[in-house]
Amino acid sequence: MTDLRALAGNLAVGVLLLAAALALAAWQAQPWAWTAPAPARLAAAIVLVACYAGAVVLAVHRRRARRTAAVATDVMPVVHASQTGFALQLAERTAEALTRAGLPARPLAIADLDAATLAEHPRLLFIAATTGEGDAPDTAAAFLQRVMAAAPSLAPLQYGLLALGDRSYAEFCAFGRQLDHWLQQQGATPLFDRIDVDDGDPGALRHWQHHLRQLTGGEMADWEAPAYAAWTLRARRLLNPGSAGGPCFHLELAPPPGAMPQWEAGDIAEIGPRDPADPQAPPLPHREYSIASLPADGAVHLLVRLQRHPDGRPGAGSGWLCDYAPIGGRIDLRLRSNPGFHPPADDRPLLLIGNGTGLAGLRALLKARVAAGHRRNWLLFGERHAAHDAFHGDELEVWRSQGWIERLDRVWSRDLGGPRYVQDRLRECAPELRAWVEDGAAVYVCGSLTGMAPGVDATLRGILGDAEIAAMLAEGRYRRDVY
């Protein structure tokens, strides 16, 4: 619509220029209408035409400058759809944090977002509120009519989405979910799973900051530092000696003296790593790890791979936990509820799919199922080599022999023969997958967002169809905790 108005305006200017030229020509042909000498008449014509052309150029330049200022391709837009102003505040805070961390960003109202902007940017962030009984904010009305209805292709786009809502309403985060579904339908790829925020939940907002930190690849101060408790590093055990991958450790963290804190399978440990050069300094910005245990185990268990920067330096979080923190030393930890990955309350079949350290979250879910007496569990797990990377293999075999795991499929990407990745094995098991889903099975995925999670999602959709996946998402039977 904007392009059509611009075209009409340019045509109108062109008509005026033509009329002006014809009038000047007529005046030149009738000396009684203008007695100035010929050079003066020519100069006046040139000035008049130049004025009109200049006006057009200036208008186009101003419009382009305004748009460039808002959507320069080297500045990532943080699009906000706000009703009360909270989404705008978060967008401003997000853009400021990203810019300070070296990733230029700026807020952009969803009313100013058009298809061209979506096409020009490789990455965007969205902060979308829901109003009333599941309605889009008033500020998003034009975007719904002008862009979403047009359904442009967004295949190159990557995006992150923070959905604001209130669980006291039936349609929790409805517009955020609608926007997320639409973006994926148009071919856009999520940078991470949508984060739903219940009434400004600080834990969900810290999870958003965790993903922002991963986008920048550097440090980013927490908006509000978690209130850590002093836990103790009780044990650290290397799980994959001789592995071609990075060393992976099983960690046990004992709680402070007193009552055992409570958490559920699927919940998250927020760790405040310390600077090894100054362990007495305040903790660095938090890192998040899936908890691999239950309170009945008497400790928080983690499965952490030592990460390294390109220059060889260990990552701040994994380096502190795997290399520097002494056994018996203090670990700053806060528990965060993650209800989107809690296990089913009933005894329905459960298919657990993951790779690498994603086994941590799946292990806690299996522990919860065993404790509840629910036996219909299928674990599909992938790593590099069977000889080195069979994390907690003995424990899994015991559960299988005792009937707590009905089916166990492990896939090794670097070993010869057989399927290489979990999605390959899942494709081979299509008939069994359909049968489990027909029996009401839930599917939980934990592990790598790049490679594994998209591959599993595409395979599930190829076997079950988009309509079935949509129904499972709506029923809470397809859940992911990927990073």
Image (cartoon, rainbow, N blue to C red):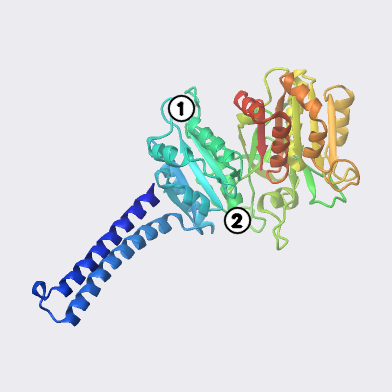
Front in this rendered view, residue 183 or 86: 183
Q: Residue 353, image x and y in percent?
A: 75, 34
Q: Residue at x 66, y 36 (%)?
A: 481
Q: CA distance from mark 2 to mark 1?
A: 36 Å
Residue at the spot of label 2 = 218
Q: Which of the labelled discs sits on residue 124, or is there none?
A: none
Q: Which of the labelled discs sits on residue 134, or is there none?
A: 1
Task: For mark 2, give the secondary structure.
Answer: loop
195 in relation to 305, above or below: above
Q: Residue 164, image x and y in percent?
A: 48, 35
Q: Quadrant of residue 218?
A: bottom right
4 in relation to 24, above or below: above
Q: Residue 355, image x and y in percent?
A: 76, 40
Precedes in sequence: disc 2 or disc 1: 1
Single out the mark in the foreground, 2 or 1.
1
For the C terminus, the quadrant is: top right
Q: Are the residues tagged 2 and 1 within 8 Å (C-beta)? A: no
Residue type (three-letter) at the residue carrying disc 1? Gly
Total count of labels: 2
Residue type (three-letter) at the residue carrying disc 2? Gly
Front in this rendered view, residue 2 or 25: 25
